[in-house]
Structure formats: C-alpha cells, structure tokens
Amino acid sequence: MIDLLTSGLAVVFAPKMFILIIFAVFLGTLFGALPGVSATMAVTLGIPFTYKMDAVNAIAFLVAIYCASITGGGMTAILFKIPGVPSSAPTTYDGYPMAQRGEAGKALGMQLLCSAIGGIFAAICMLLLSPQLTQAALSFGPSELFAISFMGLSILTSLETDNICRTLISGLIGLMLACVGLDPLLGVPRLTFGTRLLTSGIEMIPVMIGFFAVTEVLKQTNKPSKLQAVGDSKNEQMTAKMPTLKEVLSVKWIIARCSVLGTVIGILPGAGATIASFLCYSTEQKLSKTPEKFGTGCLEGIAAPETGNNAATGGAMVPLLSLGIPGGNAAAIMMSALVLKGVTMGPLLLINQPQFLSATFASMFVSNIIMVFAAIVIAKIFVQILKIPYSVLGPTIIMMATIGAYATKNTSVDVILMAISGLIGFIFVTCKFNSSAMILGLVLGIICESNLRRAYTIADGATLMEATVNIVTRPMTGIILLICLVVLLNPVIKQMLDKKKQGTA
Amino acid sequence: MALELIINLLLLATSLFCYWYVGVTMPSSAVNELGAEQWPQALLIVLIPALCWNIYKYFKKNKKEDITAAFKDFIPSIGRLVKSKLFAGMVLVVIMALMYEPIGFMLTCLLFLIAYGYLLGQRKWPALIGTSIIITIVLYIGFAVLLGVMLPRGQVSFLRNLALFIESLIPRF
C-alpha cells in the first residue's frame, strides 16, 4: 500500500505534472461553471491536452478535470440558478435563495468545502475498497438500480411540503416527458404523435436550462424596478469567504453521511453524480429536524448535494479501474482516452499496472485540495459578475444558456426547446407548480423505467403479479423500496396528522 | 387565478388523451412483462387523480364569486400581459431561438443583447451597443475559439460570409 501511495504521489508531484494538474483544475472548474458544458463535455475537451502524455499522466489529468467540473457546476447554480452540470441542480434549491439574501459568499464557501471533503473521502474509499466495492455493486441487478433511482424520486413529496399535490403533479409531468421518444427497451417511437422531432426524446439539458435560466430572467424582466442581479447588496462586500468553523461543524454529520452515500451511488454503473446529489438532498431533508428550512436557503441544503456529487466522482472510478466498466459518461470518455493510449481495460489492469489506481487516487486527492483555492479565485470572478447591471447580465445569461442548449447536439431544435421550456417554466411558476420536481422527474425517468422493465424481463414470473412479487422479495430491492415508501408517505401522513391535531385543538 | 384552473384542466385533458393514445399506439406486451405502454399509463394513473384533486382543492379554496370575477378579468388580463415587458421578453426569446441558426450566432447575439438590454431599462445607446459588441466577442472567443464549441454562422450566404469575415479578424489560439 505504501509503495502504491508513493508511486501515485510521485506521478502527481512531478513538477511538470503538478503544473498540469493545477491547469486541469482551473480548466475543469471553469468548464463546469459554464452552463451547458457538462462534466462529460469538460473531460472530452480535456482529451486533446493528453495526446502527448503517457497513459498514467493522462488519467491523472482527466480525473482532475472531472472532479473540478462537478464542483464548478455548483457555482453557477448558486449565483445564477443555472446548474453548470445536472448534478448541481439540487444546489440551486438552497444556494440561489442564499445568494438572493446576499449570502452568496457563504454559500460558495460551503459548496467548495463540502465538494473537497466529499471528493477526498471518495478518493480514499476508492483506494482502500476498490475491489470489494466493485464486487458488491456487480451483484446489484436492475431491480436494485430501479429502487435506488426511485429513492431519488422519493424527494418529490417533501420538496414543497405546503404544496405536496402540485409538487407530485410536477414530478409526474417530468416523468411523463421522459417517456417521450424511443422506448428504451423496444426502440419503438412512443408518445411522439407522429413527429420525427420528438423521436429522439426530450433533451434534458435544454429543458433544464430553459426552466432554470430563461424562466429566472423572465421573472426579473417582470420587475421593472429591479435592475440589479440577485445577491448584489450594496452594503455587503461579496467574497467567496469560507463558512465559520461553527457552521461547518453544524453540518459535519451531513458531510459524513453524504460522503458515504455519494461514494456508494457513484460505484453503481449507470447511477452517478446526478442521482447521488438528488438522493443526498432528499435523505438529509428527511433526517433533518428542521426539514422546512430546506429550499429556503440553508447551508445543509448546499452541503448535502455538493458532498454527494463529488463523492460520486470517486465512486465512478472504481468500476472503471477495477473491471473496465465505466460508471458513467465521463468515465466512459476517460476509458476511451486510455484505450486510445493502447491500455487494455479490464480486471487485469490493476493487477498488472497498479500505478493507474495510485495515480488516480493521488490526482483526486491533490486536485480536490487545489480545487478549493482555484474555485475561490474563479468564484470571486463570478461573484463580481453579479455586480453587472441586470440589463447586461440578464440577456447575457440567456445567450450563454442558448449556447449551452445548442452545444448539446448542435441543433436549433434544442434552442427552441430551451425557449419553450423557459416560457412553460414561467407558467409553471405562475400556477404554483414546482419546476425542480419536474426536472427531477425528467432526469430520473428514463433510468427508473429502463431498470424496472429490465427487472421485469428477468424476474421470471408467469404473470405480471408474479414477476412483481419476485422483484419486491429480492432482499435489497425490498428494503430500499420500503424505505422509499416511508419517505414518500411520511410528509403526507405528517400533514394529515397535523391537520387532525389542529381540528381537535 | 383563472389561468391556474385552465392549465389544470388542460393538463387533465392531455393526460386522459395520452392514456388512450399510448395504449393504442404501443405494441401489446407479454403477460409477464412490463410493456412500453404500461410505465406511462402507470404514471398517468397517479397523475390523473392528482390533477382532479388539485382542481377540487381549487374550487374548495376559492369562492364562486372570485372564480367568476377571475374569468371575467381573464381576457383583459391577457391584454395587459401583451402590453407588458414580460410578454416582450418572451417574444424576444422566441424570436432569438428561431433566428439563432438562420442568421447565425454573431448577429443573433448582438441584436438580442441590444433589444433585451433596452427592454430592461438601458437607454444609453452607446453603452448598450458597446457592451453588446464586447459581450458578443467575449462569448464567441470563450466558447467557439477557446472551447471549440460549435456556434452557427447563419444560413443566409451574406450573413455567413459576414460571420466568417468577423471570425477572421479574431486571432485563433
């Protein structure tokens, strides 16, 4: 183990490589912060830099970009309500209200700290538990993966406890929108109404950008007197200051739980940072003594998703390095970069060339520390952006959102989809529906459905009922689904009991 | 208030239609498998009652006179909306989205920044045009030149040539 650590640190601390890692962290944070440049795209954009590196240096460089981009995505989520990467969407729930109160600096500080801790924890886990955790994850079948993604959906009833019905409707609309396009198993067009435009489904990124960014600018347009961006308090000097020790200690258990949860979710193939961040947010809301504070701008609501999504980056590297199975899209890009270098991916990789694991660990460890400082510099630049008059900032946000939407597939259909989503998002908000719930449904819909249907296909039941029993009685699936049911029904029952109490009082 | 009810009713009607539509357009599935139609139908089975409940709650929460008044005010409120900055903003966003590919990034971005900036209260033309030009160039260099993100040059030949000319003035890295 000591040899492994030494060799990893030797790779990262070689002067040239260390400079490249710092460069990768800046690049990744910046890419992640730019709306529409996903973590996968950030890693892809980093590949040309690795052409002249050897394979071990290349993976160290790409891992640094990957970790930093996930962190960078949270910055724009807090400052502009635009999640730079999908996994930062839950960060908007509490980060943006804090920015609106003029606490953008504190929110950013907490986000950076939690991201770093989550990332470092996952890196250590990756080094120590790589083979064991991979074996455990491989025993997870589609039914368990469905249960895990359904757990992410269980947040629906608690996103807005005062308005459970409308939040549920919003989430279900999102899930329905995810059904549009080619059926994930049969490949037949579904709910496309004979239009070819809908065959490829409703693209998640343009919808998300439209709902969060365009809607927000439209809301500001409706306020003629307000020409300053959110969080631009004249009396407060806005800096990316770190939260106080007391504030950090107040979320220590959240960081600990989400680090573990995020790492485990990251290891599961097909899960990843997005599910991890939503799941961590919902879990912490359930466990909180003051769940009503979530969504109003509390540090707990930033700590949970940001720790979770960064912890998932370490987890995602476990199946990639141990078995040659990419845990997500970004890992798949990294794998293709290694294959380009002539590396044979698979279980023998770590046995024959353990330096891949050590270099990845060292890179994650170092980049998560550098990231805090790099992100503070970049965050300060982004915070200054808030001081720009809204007549300049508002249209620029929309143009950046447009570039992001177009960059997904280089088609104007996505730009139109973004614009329509922005208008629908505004009507959604006006009718008191919940945009976040809609996005949650859209993000997790396909994952939920495809895993559930795969589970039914392999359940080996004579009827649908028998197959259902076979699925639910799988120990892990049963336990997770039971937890989901409790989590889903808890706010409803609690509300009913409260009403009953008020009635009797 | 009227819009809320209309949207809920529209959603209900769409949900009912989708339930029928997905049922008749999808291939029939085996008895022990979850077919392509069953997942959306399962979702709609939850969504339809939820919408009905929401509509019921709407009628329970609002008085009959208030609902009538809201519907009487609905057409005038649309008139007010059309005259508002918000509607102008919506129109600008839609026009920008439609024009993005045909006239290209540079011109769309420049015109949109000027128009939306004016809408948001910027009345100093030199500042408005100056900042719009700077932002267009910064966005172009940032995304197209440095990050290699594809930005449309426009489908009209003279606009495309203009974009190529402007691009030629910006140094490549």
Image (cartoon, coloured by chain):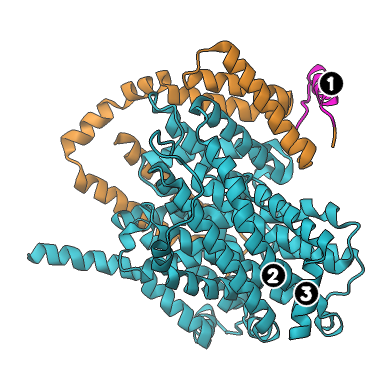
Residue A451's quadrant in the figure?
bottom right
Q: How many labels were placed on the picture?
A: 3
Chain letter for the orange part: B
Q: Secondary structure at mark 3?
A: helix
Quadrant the C terminus of chain A occupies: bottom left
**In the displayed structure, does residue A23 sit left or right of residue A181?**
right
User: Which residue, given by chain and number where applicable, does mark 2 sit on?
Assistant: A327
Q: Which residue type does callout 2 highlight?
A: Gly
Q: Which residue type does callout 3 highlight?
A: Gly
- The main secondary structure of the magenta stretch is helix
Residue B112's quadrant in the figure?
top right
**In the displayed structure, does residue A336 sit left or right of residue A492?**
right
Q: Is residue B164 magenta?
A: yes
Chain letter for the cyan part: A
User: Which residue, given by chain and number where applicable, does mark 1 sit on?
Assistant: B165
Q: Is residue A416 magenta?
A: no
Q: Position of residue B162 (x, y in %)?
A: 81, 19
Q: Residues within 10 Å of mark 2 (few under 14, many from 20)?
A: many
Magenta region, residue range: B152-171
Report the disc number at residue A346.
Answer: none
Q: Position of residue A45 (x, y in %)?
A: 78, 50
